[in-house]
Image (cartoon, coloured by chain):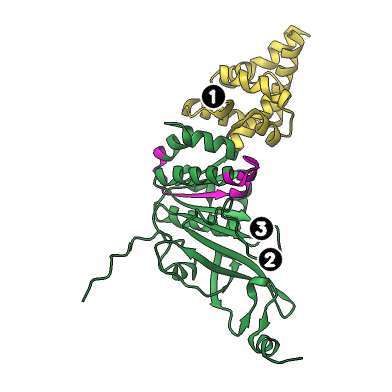
Amino acid sequence: MDKDLSARVMRDMDPELLEFLQLYVDSFVKWDLLYFFHENPHTIDTVENIARYAGRTPAAVHSALQELAQRRLLEETEMGEMVVYALTPNPQKRAQLEQFIRAGEDRQFRVKAIFHMVRGVGDD
Amino acid sequence: MTERPAIATERIPTGIIGLDEMLHGGFLPQSANLVEGAPGCGKSTLGMHFIYHGALQGEPGMILTFEEFPQQYYRDAAAFGWDFRALERQGLLRIVMSSPEVIKADLERVGGTLERQIAEMGTRRILVDSISHFERVSDTPVTLRSHIYAFLNGLRREGLTSLLTRETPYLLGEEITANSDADSSFIADSYLLLRYVEIESAVRRALIVLKMRGSDHDHRIRQFDIGPQGLYVAQPFSGREGLLSGTSRRMSESFIKAFVKR
């Protein structure tokens, strides 16, 4: 991957959005999940049910949910044998998510964000 | 002369024209109220109307949905001019999507997520749409009833007046039977039945309050419809019987059928 091109694409992105992308959105599954929790901000459910709502398999969303919880954007709670996920009640983090979703309405931003994710995958 | 026992006068009005009259002012506070009917007959609309009316009176409400996405409620409410998104921003409404097994486990915890949200908002009313999904929690009728009983008590404990919807698979008429082992109508405080009825080749909607614990209520079967401002209950069906079977007949016809030998 051309490092100069990557740097150029990222340079003209809002630093807060870039930080959000780097912290939370390193896969399409996570992007989908963030969109889902933004649209349904008071969802509280298991991996299996969230996968069903998102139209994915549990295997596809499990690690993404765990990672988003480790990064404190989601809350992970154990209820007996169940583990459930919900969006953090932290207003600052919710505002960041809102900002990301709003930015995603712009095609140029989406292209840059996708570039970031693809680059992330390539770097792995 | 002996004094009659005091009757609870505080009511939680639904705001639905005609229904509050049938309920003698509304539901009783902290009661669990079951609304049963066929798909599309207006159960969720009735529930949304109840929540919306509360929000207008400054009583925060919650919609607990199993399977149905919150967007569906925003969209359906908007059709009546009810801005549910604005109510959410004002802290008067919250639409929670979850599953029965999670909600049941959450309500059993001390300081669970739902309990926290109810306390934060000062929630007074809740629509549970629909309680039929609890059927997947257990195959055993007795256990299912126990789960629903515990769930309803959890809602009462939180001080909520609840409206619970339940689907019937039948579009028109069905034999009304109740299995006390599993049937949530036994553990609900009131039981409203919504029905499609066929009258002279047209399908109309009918509503009856079958039970209201601790209160008198209108026992007549009344017509209802969904208009531009939500649900409204109209006059009782007159000169008809057999409405709950789904196919009504004029009383004179049934009189003849009953008394004239063929």
| Vertical arrangement, residue A105 with respect to residue B241, above or below | above
The magenta stretch spans residue A124: no
Residues shaded magenta? B119-142
Type of amino acid under label 3: Thr
Q: Which residue is mark 2?
A: B174
Q: Are marks 2 and 3 on the same chain?
A: yes
Q: Quick check: can you spot residue A70?
A: yes
Picture quadrant where residue A69 is located = top right
Residue B229 picture location, percent across and down: 55, 64
- Residue at image position (63%, 67%) is B195
Q: Amino acid at mark 2?
A: Glu
Residue B124 point in image, percent of width and height: 41, 49
Check the image and name the residue furthest to the left.
Answer: B1
Total residue callouts: 3
Q: Dot 3: what SS?
A: loop
Q: Which residue is mark 1?
A: A78
Disc 1/disc 3 C-alpha distance (Å): 34 Å
Q: Amino acid at mark 1?
A: Glu
Q: Which of the pair A18/B16 is nearer the observer? A: B16
Horizontal relation, residue A3 to residue B71: left or right: right
Q: Nearer the viewer, mark 1 or mark 2?
A: 2
Discs 2, 3 touching: Cβ within 8 Å = yes
What separation in Å lies between label 2 and label 3 (alpha carbons)? 9 Å
